[in-house]
Image: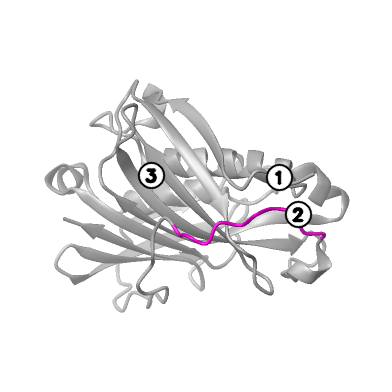
Amino acid sequence: MKASNKLERKFTIRNYETDFAQKLKPSAVLGYFQETAGDHSEEMGLGFAKLAREGHFWVLSKIYAEVESLPAFRDEITVATWPHVPNKAIYERSFTVRGASGELLLRVFSRWCILDAKNGRIVPCSKIAQPEIDFIDERAAECGEWRIDGVQEKTHPAFSIKIANSEYDLNNHVNNIKYADYIFNCFSVAELKARRLKAFQIHYVKQSHENDVLDFYREERENGVFTIEGIKNGGEQVIAARVWFE
């Protein structure tokens, strides 16, 4: 039986998913994506439980989001997602977010991998039983440049955190949605009030675990375009991001 090539889920935005302006936080929208993609993966026969029995699990590798407008507290939205034809080891997936009247709010493109739970290595697509599905070629968004160079001046972190259990997901490392909060914590309330978020891009490089100390550095490369780099325990890069403001 073929899986549907697109899945939609409706959400009503709750107060704790919003920021100081009662607008939907980027971390919360990543949570919607994670939930909707998880439901679709179950339908496709690649859900968490099945992969876990095989000693595998999903990870988000890269995500790029273009923001037309952020919905607000109590708004009703529809999240749609559809996968693209996988390549040797990467599963690509698009998302859109629409308002109650059908207006397009966000366009998103993402890349995912399946990892081996024992050694943390990427599992080739050829090693996984693939679903029968009519893939959609059209991407919701196109990322012009995936490469993100590191921050040059790492003198004083813009934000730091020591990882504890509340940051974890079911795979026993920091949940991918948490990094969006860390990234935007590199900006003050005043800065975020003065700017409109246009787009953001996150590359997940290394996993983080309990007691790791993460330092986040920011650098404005162009007017309104910031690079963010997260460093673990003073050495390894765990995340790189780019944020565009209008």
In this rendering, the answer to whether 212 lies above or below 231 is: above
Residue at (26%, 46%) from the top-left corner?
Answer: 68
Q: Amino acid at mark 2?
A: Pro
Q: Mark 2 Cα within 10 Å, few/some/many (few <14, many 20+)?
A: some
The N terminus sits in image quarter: top right
Element type where label 3 sits in the image:
helix
Residues at circles 1 and 2 in contact by the CB criterion of under 8 Å: yes
Q: What residue is pinned by disc 3?
A: 26
Q: What residue is pinned by disc 2?
A: 131
Q: Quadrant of residue 15?
A: top left
Q: How is the image coloured?
A: one colour
Q: Position of residue 16 (x, y in %)?
A: 40, 26
The C terminus sits in image quarter: bottom left
Residue at (31%, 79%) from the top-left corner?
Answer: 152
Residue at (38%, 67%) from the top-left corner?
Answer: 143
* Dot 2 or dot 3, earlier in sequence: 3
Element type where label 2 sits in the image:
loop
Our reading of the magenta stretch's main secondary structure is loop
- Rounded to the nearest whole Å, what is the CA distance between mark 2 and mark 3? 30 Å
Q: Position of residue 9 (x, y in %)?
A: 52, 32
- Nearer the camera: disc 1 or disc 3: 1
In the picture as drawn, the residue positioned furthest to the top comes out as: 74
Instruction: Report whether residue 214 is seen.
Output: yes
Q: Which residues are magenta?
A: 129-139
- Rounded to the nearest whole Å, what is the CA distance between mark 1 and mark 3? 29 Å
* Left or right position of 140 against 75: right
Q: Amino acid at mark 3?
A: Pro
* Dot 1 or dot 3, earlier in sequence: 1
Instruction: Report whether residue 169 is seen.
Output: no
Q: What residue is pinned by disc 1?
A: 3
The mark found on residue 90 in the picture is none
